[in-house]
Image (cartoon, rainbow, N blue to C red):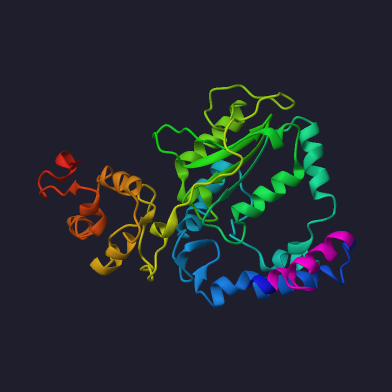
Amino acid sequence: MYEAMYGKGNCYDQTLDCYHTGRSDICPYAEAFCTDEVEAVLDNIAHRDGYDIRRSSDDPFPETFYVDYLNTPKVQAAIGAYTNFSRSSSTIGAAFTRTGDGDHVGGGIIEHMRSLINDNITIVMYAGDADYYCNWLGVEAVAGKINPPGFRYAGYTDMNTSDGIVHGQVKQAGAFTFARIFESGHAVPYYQPLVSLEMFKRVLAGKDIATGEISVKGGSDYKTIGSKQSWWREGNSAIQPGKVSQDATYNTTTNMPNSVNQTAGATAKWSVGLKKADMRRVMRSPNGWTDEFWDNLCRMPAVTRFGYVCPTKVRRAATLHAN
């Protein structure tokens, strides 16, 4: 994959060629090469989901029942919709492909973003850090290329949210922000709904993204203070090595599939490489968990390794504690 990306005349070079020329006879070929030889490798060879590398390629998340909900007459009337909702359009997708849009990073995109910043428009570029296709390192690099005033001097700081859990880190200068959202695939609001909502509210209220307490306007000299890089790594505790049942549901507290329709073996695999902070979060969020999940959880090596005691079934939620 590295050779396909950076080898002479391969994806990187072809992308630069498209960037500098913008030619319709170059960009489609560049996009096709990068898609087949770099992007698709994760799906076709590693059998991982490009939108969430924690899962296998038959990942059932996010579920699609929301499409039926959005197409109910009641909802459409409430929002004033005049056509049905569709998740995607093959017609539009084919049109983008014909122009090589995926490699069309030129065309003044960076300049257009800078123009919005000059007009004091609030901008938040964010990415889930388990997303491969729109990976956070690439989005971070684009944010660095845009480089609004003061951004290079800003640092990464944790995002504070109402649940007291750090769901991501932000780097902000004025009204421009890059946010890395932890333990999230492509559809960030699905995997991390709380931080997504609070981030959205802070944008609307003109507040800083890290705390939601400081008024920030375009052109201001506000900057986040922190490290130059976002160094947090989830490690292999985030990886689901086996397949997930197609009717499983996603738990946004544990950031894992719920135990329903999962085997004890699959549950045990989730614990591989768990860090103490991970286990503390899991053990303090028992509401609605089944006895089957508790039984599987209490067999995890990480439970005993970090000194946690599993309670009886009757007193589980109330008496779980750390020695």
Among the 4 quarters of the image, the one containing residue 260: bottom left
Q: Is the residue 303 above or below the residue 13 in the image?
A: above
What residue do we see at 32% from left, 57% from top? 258
Residue 6 is covered by the magenta coloring: yes
Q: Position of residue 314 (x, y in %)?
A: 9, 46
* 79 up-or-down from 85: above or below: above
Residue in view at x 40 percent, y 38 percent = 165
Q: Looking at the image, which is closer to me, 55 or 87?
A: 55
Residue drawn 18% across and 42% down? 320
Q: Is residue 119 magenta?
A: no
Main SS, magenta region, reads helix
Looking at the image, how many numbered discs can be counted on the residues?
0
Q: Quadrant of the C terminus?
A: top left
Q: Position of residue 35 (x, y in %)?
A: 68, 71
Q: Position of residue 170 (x, y in %)?
A: 57, 38
- The structure residue drawn at horizontal position 23% and vertical position 66%, both measured from the top left corner, is 264
Is residue 40 toward the left or the right of residue 115 in the image? left
Left or right, 226 with respect to 219, comes to left
The stretch of residues the image draws in magenta is 4-20
Query: Where, by quadrant of the figure, is residue 243 drawn?
Result: bottom left
Residue 90, how many percent across, how many down?
67, 68
Look at the image and tell me in which quarter the N terminus lies. Answer: bottom right
Decide which of 81, 211 is in the foreground and name it. 211
